[in-house]
Amino acid sequence: MSDKKVSIAKRAEDYSRWYLDVIREADLAEHSAVKGCMIIKPHGYALWENMQAVLDRRFKETGHQNAYFPLFVPKSFLSREASHVEGFAKECAVVTHHRLIDNPDGEGVVVDPKAKLEEEVVVRPTSETIMYDAYSRWVKSWRDLPILINQWANVVRWEMRTRLFLRTTEFLWQEGHTAHATHDEATEEALKMLDVYREFAEDWMAMPVITGSKPDHDKFPGALTTYCIEAMMQDRKALQAGTSHDLGQNFAEAFDVKFTDQDGQEKFVWQTSWGVSTRLIGGLIMAHSDDNGLVLPPKLAPIKVVIVPIGKDEDKTPVMEMVEKVQVALGERLIGIKVDDRENYGPGFKFTEWERKGVPLRIEIGPKDVEKGTVVMVRRDNGEKIFVSVDEVADTAEKILAEIQDGLLERAKQFRSENSRNIDSYEELKEFFAGDGGFAYSHWCGQAACDEKSKEETKASIRCVPFDQKKESGQCVVCGGSSEGRVIFAKAY
């Protein structure tokens, strides 16, 4: 962060610029020399590491193991499952040669024409094909099932319109891939992992989500059913924060993943895949941050409490003695405590920096605080200042951090509630999305054409069919056809 204070755009005036300003001022990421790719800086990567740690623990608690599969996928693998290749073909990066040579016509290097690969390989856009080829060798008997594997990896999808964290050509994610003896087991797995995502989003990210299924025309290429969690951002757009797929036997048949069951019959396995990515960081930014910068839920914040000593040289010793006392007391209860004792920056600069980086709680200690035996605590979520006895610092800090975590979730829930409504006519739907928009709960006949028409004319599409959808007769908001329940229309990232 530079000495110069750079302004952050107001959310209400320029949301897109505000989002990028927050990322820059929080020092989370920046664009790289490769178009569409990003550099995740240490503060941003620490946030991803915290997310990884929580999710990885939950995956292992639910019986999954980590493995790693190659970055490169034989191009022929993608064509084995027709809808899969159709869904990803336009996004694939293809490697055709394996060597560069000096340019015989001038400076630089060129592809060696003699180094053409016998079979071109694709940089993985997702790993179903390369993993299921291996599963076909690993599975022989019902005793080999279930296979419960997760992979932490990077993937490449050649995006034309990119935005830091939300949509980049290369991104980090986890992808779970499982194989089961029965469809019931696979369905249970897909729904279980969706609930792991819901729990993580709400309990750790303080980001309320709606669980449901995608319309058939919008499901993952090759899946029978795609389940999702959808969150509302502060510009009232939806963010698909995670997906879990019931793959049926489509990939099993394509890659010959079969087993001999207890009845002696040879059968294809039933499969699932599920994943979340660094897009969650974008969701975290847009769900909670404000015009002063990043706001982080304490459970995921890399730095939960920053202590800023204040005072001139003659006051330094007693101030630092109290700082150390507070640091020790907090360290016995919490992780993520930082003392900012840099001498080349003043307190005002430090306050602004940590505010913009989203540190949930700041503690200020100066000579007058030492005399009184108190400290000043400043909450990031609402800016409230609290004067606390030094002996009560640890208890108070724990209490405040818990209040911030719960408060962010409740605030986001209230915002979503205030910007969601039932809409029963197409004119009203168009008017709703011509204005501020939000989540429109409307009847839908089940036809893809109606979703496409809405998307074309309002820029709002069906985000999900909520699990808690009530069965009720109605008329499709677009065409007037019969409907058995409401779905969620929204503009989305």
Image (cartoon, rainbow, N blue to C red):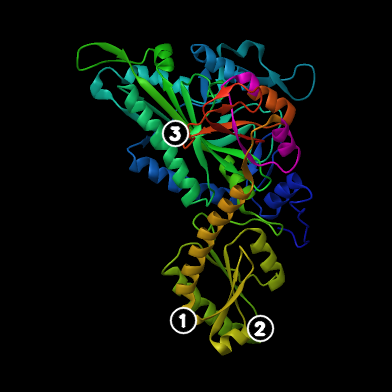
Q: Which residue occupies 52% across, 43% down?
A: 209
Gap between marks 2 and 1 measured at Cα = 25 Å
Q: Secondary structure at mark 1?
A: helix
Q: Which residue occupies 55% across, 32% down?
A: 486
Disc 1 marks a residue whose amino acid type is: Asp
Q: Position of residue 352 (x, y in %)?
A: 69, 65
Q: Is residue 134 left or right of residue 154?
A: left
Which quadrant of the rendered structure holds the C terminus?
top right
Residue indicated by mark 2:
313
Which marked residue is nearer to the observer: mark 2 or mark 3?
3
Which marked residue is nearer to the observer: mark 1 or mark 3?
1
Q: Nearer the viewer, residue 30 or 8?
A: 8
Residue indicated by mark 3:
151
Q: Secondary structure at mark 2?
A: helix
The segment highlighted magenta reads 427-450
Gap between marks 1 and 3 measured at Cα = 46 Å
Asked if the stretch drawn in magenta spans residue 38, the answer is: no
Number of residues whose C-alpha sits closer than 10 Å to that of mark 1, classed few (under 14), some (14–19) or many (20 or more): some
